[in-house]
Amino acid sequence: MKKTAFVALCCAFAANAHAEGLPEKYETAGKVVVANQPNYPPMEYKDPATNTLMGVDIDLALALAKQLGTTVEWADIGFEQMVSSLTTGRADLIHSGMSDLPKRRDSLDFVDYMKSGAQFYTSAARKDEFKTITDFCGKTVGMSRRTSFPDEAAKWSAANCEAAGKPALVVVGTEGSADARAQLKQGRLDGAVQGSETLPYLLTLEPDTYAIVGEPFTAVYQGIGFAKGSTELRDAYAGALKALMASGEYKAIFAKYGLEAAILDGIYVNGEVAK
């Protein structure tokens, strides 16, 4: 984003966030419709015993709505249809573990709320084979095809495997993170890639089953997505997030899931800090 454009965006954010709450249409409706697919613990998932929605994104979305004086209506929408759900009016915003990527900013604006990164892991039985992430060069590694991970893994391989004269990473696009884990357990994969925010929870859920290898090989923000043109709604949410940060509720939500390292130090819009 050009500096002049970003300065204008920040000025607009400052004015709207402090002077206005929700746009009138949402206040009249008494709700915001939030696109979310609850299959990405600990960000969003359903309690198997009660079928209740749980997770960081769930708790944060509810806290933001409360701060704005409204309620949430959840729309369970497949990840591939989330952007179109905004343009068709099926949903008002996306809050579902979506990375704030430059290519997505053509159709969305983001209010970022956490740090994330793609990270390698393998089965606990094979952890001694993978001391560093470059030990995956030439190996078969699975990751959800619906995410940016396959492209990011291919770029990492070009820079860290092929450039060093090692065989390329064999990237396998899976139906999701659960599918990648199933194939890893079956021995069809040597390793897998997931968002760094999910792996501590995974190790707690299935102890002695997986082993994290190295540090994340990407660094991205995850953001709440808004359709281009929904400036007032975006800025209202940015203001609400700022209030939750000031009160300590934002940090408490991440601490509840052991993800304090993922929190941000301020308000970021489209990957840039809003002054």
Image (cartoon, grey):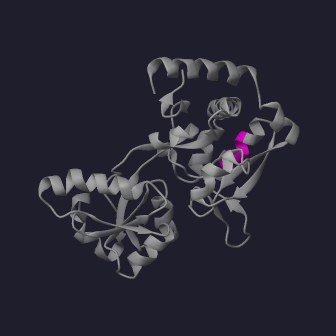
The reply to whether residue 207 is in sight is no
**139 or 104, nearer to the observer:** 104
Q: Quadrant of residue 180?
A: bottom left
- Residue at 44 percent of width and 72 percent of height: 181
- Residue at 45 percent of width and 63 percent of height: 145
Q: Position of residue 60 (x, y in %)?
A: 66, 46
- Was residue 250 drawn as part of the magenta stretch in this picture? no
Q: Is residue 67 left or right of residue 82?
A: right
The reply to whether residue 23 is in sight is yes
Q: Position of residue 205 (x, y in %)?
A: 52, 69
- Was residue 61 drawn as part of the magenta stretch in this picture? yes
User: Which is the main secondary structure of the residues drawn in magenta?
Assistant: helix
- Residue at 86 percent of width and 42 percent of height: 29
Q: Position of residue 97 (x, y in %)?
A: 56, 52
Above or below, 160 relative to 222: below
Above or below, 106 relative to 4: below
Q: Residue furthest right?
A: 28
Above or below, 185 relative to 24: below
Q: Residue furthest bottom?
A: 186
**117 or 261, nearer to the observer:** 117
Q: Quadrant of residue 208?
A: bottom left
Q: Quadrant of the C terminus?
A: top right
Q: Position of residue 131 (x, y in %)?
A: 23, 63
The part of the chain drawn in magenta is 59-64
